[in-house]
Image (cartoon, grey):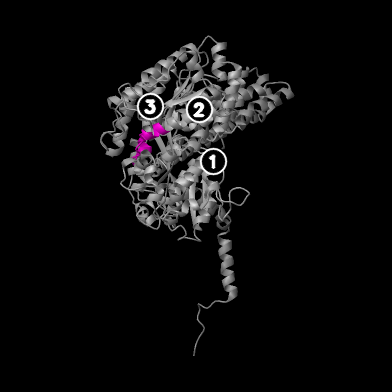
Amino acid sequence: MTNSNRRTFLKATGVGLLSGLAGCTRGGDGSDGSGSDGSSGGSDGGTSTDGSDGELAIPLSEYEDADIDWRQFEGSSINIGAVQHPWVSAIKPAVPVFEELTGIDVVWNVLPEQQFRTKRQTDVSTGAGQFDVFYMDQVVNQFREEGWIQPLDPFFDDESLFDEDWYDPDDLFEASRWQAHGGGYSDTWTGMPITVEVQTQFYRKDLYDKHDLEVAETLEEFRQNAQTIHENESDVVGTVGRGDKGYGMNIYILNTFLREFGSSLWTEFPTDSGLDSDGVINAAEWYVSLLQDYGPEGASTQTWSDVLSTMQEGRAGHIVSDANLFWPGLTGSDSSVADTIGIAKVPSPADGQFSPNAFNWQISTSKNAQNSEQAFLFMVWASSQPTNTWMHVKGDAAFSVRQSVWENDEFRSRVGENFAQVTLESLQEAAPDPFDRKYPEWGQRYSEELQRAIAGQKSAEEAMTQAASIAEDIYSN
Amino acid sequence: MSTPTQTETTPQSTFARLRDLWNDYLPYWFMAPMVAVMVMITFFPGAYDLYLSLIAEPTLDVFAADFVGLRNFETAFTRGGAIHSFVITITVVVSALLLETILGFVLAALVAGVGSGRAKSFYRVLFIIPMAVAPVSLATIGRIMLNSEIGIIPYVINTGTPFAAPNFLSEIPLLTVILLDAWNWTPFMFIIFYAGLSSVPKTLIEASRVDGAPMWRRYVHVIIPYMKPVVFVATLIRLIDLFRTFGVVYGLTGGGPGTATQLVSINIYEQMFINNQITVAAAIAVVYLVLVVALCNVIIAKVGFEGVWD
């Protein structure tokens, strides 16, 4: 490795770590996920406006068509517990609109991810009920089964709080609605989805042109492309992907491929994890050998930020599959290969089903919250079409859970036609992880086994068989 | 006719009794604030940890808690990986302590033997620098320097030696962790041993030299025995600190690959904040606390007061 490469890597690593990619799925990775919003506590209360001209960011008329009694809780306030995350930055300028519309003050409690998790756990388990609204992730079913979060269905049924025609819930991606129902484990709404990311493939167009390669649609084509670049380019590896353990790390990627190989997590819940099925073992063998043969040295320790910075620095031909939210980081000023990055749907087996993994953040309310109805009004307002469209067209957001936003011409023009279309098609076919009650526990162990396989400590088959045994043992006890 | 009862008291007698109470228990009153502080900062957290380890789900309402006996301990030692993490921790603690003690002493002896005062100052500053690096910075520096693609250490090994550099973080992660800790904390041992060597009376060394003892004999029979208390205190402090190691290892390997470097502290953290198994984390912490305190007490009892502080 040359000195200039080393310098560039150090620069790219620093920039990559600091870039606002807090939206990339995490959990079980130890990162506290510092994002672009560093505020904590305080209030955005009052009727402040966006900009200096005294006008609200979004006209109130956008919400007045709704058959909702927006002002029924005038004079109250809600506490929102959130992680440092681009969604918070994107929606904050519009919050004065909500406050003007409803007369409800919004108080933010924004914390780094791990600190927030601890505070949230304390808040719900002790019955403190400090947060009326809080971020919710992979622990949703654990919280639901403990009785800590409140189903939203009664609020949806309340005509003064919700207008189905105006809100248009069918505009939310099916995958997002499914994940908001506890990933299929709940018949009721556990929260409202606010962001979604889906896995896509990133590749170097210049290297594809140089070696006369076609964008891969199948796993075999992808492997051949990776091999060609790996063997013909110095200082550029064929591919790069998450190898580190953590349920937001290597298994977040592998889960796409195991579905494409015709398998799934928990083929029979809670007795058969499916992790030792042929589909999972084949997927693991493919992913492990891909990283071992055409990935960087030490692929087993690569986190999402390592993957991003490796690609940003131009040291990899592809990212096999990862969050579409990498797009701004790969094509922006942080990237030394910004003009050469292409995006495509993730490859699938020749006889498999295209099924990219996706991850949603949602906001929920607890059973002990003092102002759950006000919280629900905030959720409806925040995820409604006018607010969501404004965040994506006027702001810099690119994680909408609404199909209409991804089809919006103005938005597509801002983010790029190809990025929007690939993301839209991927989201329409997305198969998010179903987070059962003990997912954090067995998911961590499953990811440790996969990491051992990527590190060459055991075969993929041995690792997945062990992972299956661990997952099933956790439920049998 | 009424008579005064014997139980009636005057203000003076009450004051006198309080004064006697104060005087009789004077040492205890002086100790009371410290006892209160110790209860708050040591006893209460320990007791709360024990409480958490015995209940099904965390709750502040003790009367509503569902006590489950030793079930969390059973979980910790069956599927919680407690035994594995204890083995890893003992391996790291023993290896790193030995390495740091030996290296620290050798470095201290070498610097003490340097004639020039200016050179001594230079070496003292040079050797102390690694100790000043924060754990998270050290882990980040380590990850970059050991990276097989762009790290300076694999580059030097590959270009400067006939050997191929191993992949430090995936092939030899435990050894890498031990070596990084040794690099970080050998300066601590160095500085204490250097101070200890400086305190050895020159007359003793002169006398042994006059008697014709070679250098290694002077160290074995004069200097090291004289430094026994210093060595004991330094290793005990470092031993306790090694049991608390977390940041460097977590930042460097995250406890992996798999669980190859999963110290007890990392296991507790993962059970607590990743798996949300708070009560299992508490159970591991209780066992760990008891073992470390017991070990330290045994060392102090068996080694500390036999010829060291007598």
Amino acid type at image mark 1: Gly
Query: At 55% from the left edge and 59% from the top edge, which residue is drawn?
Result: B25
Task: Kindly report which numbered mark, 3 or 2, lies closer to the viewer in this rendering.
Answer: 2
Q: Which of the 4 image quarters holds residue B10?
A: bottom right
Describe residue B11's horizontal placement relative to residue A79 as left or right.
right
- Determine contact: label 2, label 1, CB under 8 Å: no
Tell me the residue that label 2 is attached to: A308
Choose between A124 and B218: the one closer to the eye.
Answer: A124
Q: Earlier in the sequence, mark 2 or mark 1?
A: 2
Choose between B265 and A126: the one closer to the eye.
Answer: A126
Label 1, secondary structure: give it.
Answer: loop
- Determine contact: label 3, label 2, CB under 8 Å: no
Residue at mark 3 shares a chain with residue at mark 2 = yes
Chain for disc number 3: A
Tell me the residue that label 1 is attached to: A395
The correct choice, above or below, for A237 with respect to B244 in the image is above
Q: Which residues are magenta?
A: A424-443
Tell me the residue that label 3 is attached to: A450
Chain for disc number 1: A
Amino acid type at image mark 3: Leu
Using a 10 Å C-alpha cutoff, classify the residue at mark 1 as few (fewer than 14 neighbours), some (14 to 19) or many (20 or more).
Answer: some
For residue A430: magenta? Answer: yes
Choose between B52 and A188: the one closer to the eye.
Answer: A188
Residue at mark 1 shares a chain with residue at mark 3 = yes
For residue B154: magenta? Answer: no
Query: At 42% from the left edge and 33% from the top edge, which residue is drawn?
Result: A424
Chain for disc number 2: A
